[in-house]
Image (spheres, rainbow, N blue to C red):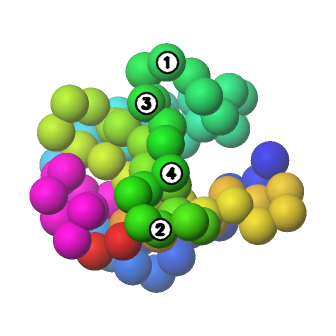
Amino acid sequence: MKIRRTKAFDKLFLKLPVHLQKKTEKAIRLLVQDFYHPSLHTKKMSGKEEIWEARVDYHYRFTFTVYEETIILRVVGNHDEVLKNP
């Protein structure tokens, strides 16, 4: 699968502390290798048929959509921010 980042994702990603940026990059690599890797807790967002979420860690998530063979990263941030801003 290919990865594409939205401008919103990039903007939020750059605001994260460096250690969370590294964790996010690792989570994205895992997502590409295994969509349902256990540490990601990948799931469709409730009420959002096309939007998925995955864990960076216990407090941080990112959302994405899948179009053909491309994962489109939408937003990243703490759990509450991501759920407010799908």
Residue kind at label 4, given as amino acid type? Lys
Residue under pointer 4: 44
- Mark 2–mark 4 CB contact (< 8 Å): yes
Q: Which region shows up in magenta?
A: 76-84
- Mark 1–mark 3 CB contact (< 8 Å): yes
Instruction: Tell which circle, 3 or 2, labels the residue nearer the N-terminal end.
Output: 3
Residue 84 location, x and y as percent?
21, 71
Would you call the spot at circle 3 few (<14 residues within 10 Å), some (14-19), or many (20 or more)? Answer: some
Residue under pointer 2: 48
Q: Secondary structure at mark 1?
A: loop
Residue under pointer 1: 38
Residue drawn at x 25%, y 62% is: 83
Discs 2/1, front: 2
Q: CA distance from mark 3 to mark 4?
A: 10 Å
Q: CA distance from mark 3 to mark 2?
A: 16 Å
Instruction: Tell which circle, 2 or 1, labels the residue nearer the N-terminal end.
Output: 1
